[in-house]
Image (cartoon, rainbow, N blue to C red):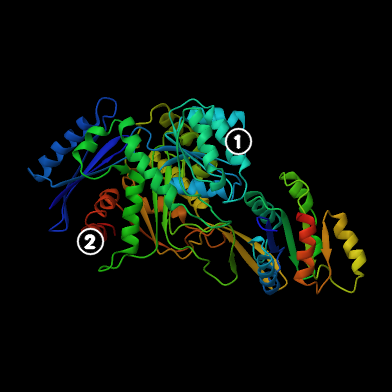
């Protein structure tokens, strides 16, 4: 996966910084070029960073339960900005309350996300998926 | 040692004689700039006036800056407006150029035509981080290759596309040079190499094109763009030198006939814990130049921004009086208001509006966000709320009866949270027009320049 660029960040008004740093470190160790936007990242920032760096995928984290509101519309913004078919991966504590993950996954897939991960997913899982997606 | 400095403006050539041993100004003089025939004529007239006022003297060094013949006209091109396009614009402005316009994404045929009409001296072409997007910069190079004009293109974008871009321009017989990317990594600003390239090109190509070769031959140091000299003066006054302390963070405002320039020398880091910085980092010494905010040549667009109603309210006069003054100034740019007249009040109100608008574009914009941890603020740009000193420069402010009223335009009022404008600064005026001269002198005798600045600007 050398020479592949991914954008990472924690979306919305979410300030959970630790997981973001761990994920970025793991991705770099796997040979990826990571553009980490940190915490409190807007959809627009994800899109603009991906355009400027010609990113191959966008990885969105959300830990505080507002993920569904924050992520809605990101795919459309990517399409609008010319990032056609860019893989969008999302994970964390995406929703509040006890919800079946399968349902959550379906809702995020309907929003245009390529991969949706439940709480507690290890970085290795994502890295394996990226290998398949990015080829 | 005696230094003579000349600031060749579009209207006036301003001369300052400095005694570096006594660390004082011997005298100043101004004469009309004679760019049409030969700038040396205006310079010699000024020198004669200067000698009449201070007596015969011989100078050891001659230093010169110029903004004559339209200054250093540039356009900047980038990819995303808030990223490389902003970085390119910042690089060109900080180098002292008059950035007429900046463009983002692939430029359209209409925009190419606009650039041709602007007829810039230099074009700063950027786009993409190193290893990032290259399509847009290549596409824009092809557009620029088709434009008529004798501009030089500085290529300061994605290094992986720079050589291809250079080749495209070379094949079209357009001059260009490659320098480092203005944004090599995402959100990393790297404008110094581009600034240096602009300075060198100004010296090598522009001086001659603007008819300044004769003056250049008289000086043993380079002629630089006037805004760069002003920037150097501001930096010296703010930061000081090893032996003498500077005055600290400051903002300087220069309202001219065609543009309004703003300088800030400050880190501009967020001033409170609940303010979080977003976007690309900005340079400590930042200049912005607004080509649509000027007191004469761009008065129409300035008045449109302020609105006639606001100006009339500020100047305590009628809308008709404002309209009359604006149309007089547009018809005859050399119109000046009488002392203490209604026109002077209108002029001051418009200048205050220019300062306000220019500051709102220069400083950071604040946006409230509501988080599970309470209200926070995002700032995109410099937080200038704590700036202690605002300095007024240029004729419009210096000649005004109420310069502080004009400068108050940059101050944010208590209920305004959208812009990180200075909250409670003190004001000072460069009443003897020495900032550019001291900026020039700072390259040779910074101690003398700093002492004179500290004595004169209060």
Estimate the x, y position of residue B253 in percent, counting from the top left.
Answer: 40, 51
Q: Nearer the viewer, residue B131 or B268?
A: B131
Helix, strand or loop for disc 1: helix
Residue drawn at x 70%, y 58% is: A1
Left or right of residue B185: residue B251: left
Q: Answer whether labels 2 and 1 touch (C-beta < 8 Å).
A: no
> Residue B7 shows which numbered tag?
none
Q: Which tag, 2 or 1, sits closer to the chain's start?
A: 1
Would you say B72 lies left or right of B364 here? left
Which element carries disc 2, helix, strand or loop?
Answer: helix
How far across and down, in percent of the image, does residue B278 sit? 59, 60
Quarter of the view holding residue B150: top left
- Asked whether the viewer can see residue B315, the reply is no
Distance from disc 2 to disc 1, alpha carbons, whole Å, reads 49 Å
* Observer-nearest of B202 and B379: B202
Query: B163 or B433, which is in the foreground?
Result: B163
Disc 1: host chain:
B
The location of residue B19, given as percent across then percent down, is 14, 53
| Disc 2 residue crowd, few under 14, some 14–19, many 20+, Cα 10 Å | some
Would you name the residue on which mark 1 appears? B139
Q: Residues within 10 Å of mark 1 (few under 14, many from 20)?
A: some
Would you place residue B277 above or below residue B373 in this image? above
At x 61%, y 40%, the residue is B136
Q: How many marks?
A: 2
- Subunit under mark 2: B
Q: Determine the residue positioned at 35% across, 48% down.
A: B228
Residue A110 x %, y %: 88, 55
Q: In the rendered image, which residue does mark 2 sit on?
A: B447
Query: In this rendering, which labeled residue sits more in front, label 2 or label 1?
Result: 1
Residue B80 visible in this rendered orientation of the protein: yes
């Amino acid at each position: 996966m050398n020479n592949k660029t991914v954008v990472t960040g924690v979306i919305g008004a979410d300030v959970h910084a630790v997981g973001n740093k761990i994920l970025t470190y793991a991705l770099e160790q796997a040979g990826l070029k990571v553009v980490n936007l940190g915490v409190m990242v807007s959809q627009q920032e994800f899109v603009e960073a991906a355009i400027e760096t010609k990113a191959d995928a966008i990885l969105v984290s959300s830990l505080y339960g507002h993920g569904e509101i924050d992520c809605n519309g990101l795919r459309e913004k990517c399409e609008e900005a010319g990032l056609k078919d860019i893989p969008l991966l999302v994970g964390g504590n995406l929703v509040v309350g006890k919800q079946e993950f399968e349902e959550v996954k379906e809702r995020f897939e309907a929003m245009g996300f390529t991969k949706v991960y439940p709480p507690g997913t290890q970085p290795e899982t994502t890295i394996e998926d990226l290998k398949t997606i990015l080829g | 040692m005696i230094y003579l400095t000349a600031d060749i403006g579009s209207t006036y050539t301003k001369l300052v004689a400095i005694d570096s041993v006594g660390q004082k100004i011997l005298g100043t003089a101004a004469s009309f700039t004679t760019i049409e025939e030969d700038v040396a004529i205006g310079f010699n007239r000024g020198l004669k006036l200067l000698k009449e006022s201070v007596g015969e003297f011989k100078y050891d060094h001659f230093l010169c800056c110029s903004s004559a013949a339209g200054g250093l006209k540039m356009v900047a091109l980038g990819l995303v407006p808030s990223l490389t396009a902003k970085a390119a614009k910042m690089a060109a402005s900080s180098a002292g150029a008059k950035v007429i316009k900046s463009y983002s994404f692939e430029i359209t045929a209409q925009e190419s035509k606009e650039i041709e009409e602007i007829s810039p001296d230099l074009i700063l072409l950027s786009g993409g981080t190193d290893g990032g997007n290259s399509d847009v910069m290549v596409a824009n190079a092809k557009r620029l290759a088709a434009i008529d004009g004798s501009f030089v293109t500085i290529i300061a974008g994605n290094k992986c596309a720079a050589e291809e871009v250079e080749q495209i321009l070379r094949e079209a017989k357009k001059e260009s040079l490659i320098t480092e990317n203005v944004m090599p990594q995402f959100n990393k600003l790297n404008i110094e190499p581009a600034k240096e390239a602009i300075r060198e090109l100004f010296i090598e190509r522009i001086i001659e094109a603007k008819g300044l070769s004769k003056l250049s031959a008289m000086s043993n140091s380079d002629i630089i763009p006037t805004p760069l000299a002003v920037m150097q003066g501001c930096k010296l006054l703010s930061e000081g030198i090893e032996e003498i302390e500077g005055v600290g963070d400051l903002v300087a405002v220069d309202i001219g006939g065609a543009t309004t320039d703003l300088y800030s020398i400050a880190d501009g880091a967020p001033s409170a814990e609940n303010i979080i910085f977003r976007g690309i980092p900005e340079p400590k010494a930042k200049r912005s130049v607004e080509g649509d905010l000027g007191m004469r040549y761009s008065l129409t667009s300035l008045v449109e921004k302020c609105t006639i109603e606001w100006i009339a309210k500020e100047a305590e006069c009628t809308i008709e009086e404002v309209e009359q003054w604006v149309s007089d100034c547009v018809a005859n740019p050399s119109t000046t208001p009488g002392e203490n007249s209604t026109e002077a009040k209108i002029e001051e109100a418009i200048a205050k509006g220019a300062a306000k608008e220019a500051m709102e574009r220069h400083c950071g914009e604040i946006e409230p966000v509501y988080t599970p941890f309470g209200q926070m603020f995002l700032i995109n740009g410099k937080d200038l709320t704590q700036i202690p000193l605002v300095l007024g420069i240029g004729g419009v402010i210096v000649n005004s009866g109420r310069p502080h009223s004009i400068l108050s335009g940059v101050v944010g009022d208590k209920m305004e949270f959208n812009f990180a404008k200075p909250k409670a600064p003190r004001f000072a005026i460069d009443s003897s027009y020495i900032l550019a001269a001291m900026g020039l002198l700072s390259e040779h005798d910074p101690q003398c320049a700093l002492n004179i600045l500290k004595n004169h600007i209060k």
